[in-house]
Image (cartoon, helix red, strand yellow):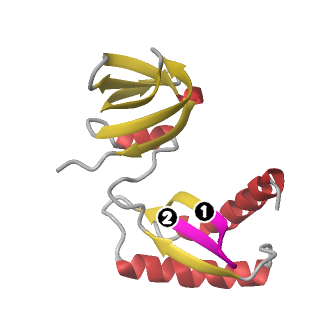
Amino acid sequence: MDAVEKKDSDEAIKDIIIPILSSFGIELVDLEYKKSGPKWFLRVFIDKKDGVSLDDCEKASKHISQVLDVEDIIPHTYILEVSSPGLDRPLKKIEDYQREKGKLVRINTFGPINNQKIFIGRILDIESGNVKIEEERLGKMEIPLSNIAKARLEIEF
């Protein structure tokens, strides 16, 4: 499966999964469909306002599995895993950054800013397509969403 096929496949899976999750008040945080050794895995990461329970994961898994079996859009036998995104959840959408204001984040950028590509700081705001953070060494700065390759919450102890 090449990169274009994978992207199309991921989008088709999301188009099926999102309405199922929404009907239970659950949000799709992330989706991974990849091969590990000889097996394919479909990992679905979910969340909701008050956090997800084991029952939420079981209910989502049951309904997703039933619909995907009927739609039959996945060309391989796969193992479905549904879970919460964890404490170090990825931030992908504007709403993710807004919800997590004040929290510590690690941002990897596509291109360098001030000669670096990894930033750790507190989320201050998001506006005009920029994430504003208080970076540990550089102070207040803005990072364009379009330059963010990956962003995750940092676990604080």
Residue in view at x 41 percent, y 45 percent: 152
Query: Which amino acid type is marked by label 1?
Result: Glu
Mark 1 crowdedness (10 Å alpha carbons): few <14, some 14-19, many ≥20: few
Query: Which amino acid type is marked by label 2?
Result: Phe
Q: Position of residue 66 (x, y in %)?
A: 66, 85
Task: Of the two numbered discs 1 and 2 on the same chain, state the one appearing first in sequence.
Answer: 1
Point out which mark residue 45 bears. 2
Quadrant occupied by the N terminus: bottom right
Q: Position of residue 92 (x, y in %)?
A: 52, 44
Residue 43 among those drawn in magenta: yes
Taking 106 as reference, is 15 above or below it? below
Residue in view at x 63 percent, y 67 percent: 17
Give the left or right position of residue 37, taking residue 108 as reference. right
Give the left or right position of residue 112, taking residue 4 as reference. left
Looking at the rendered structure, the secondary structure element under dot 1 is strand
Instruction: Please name the residue that numbered disc 1 is placed on.
Output: 32
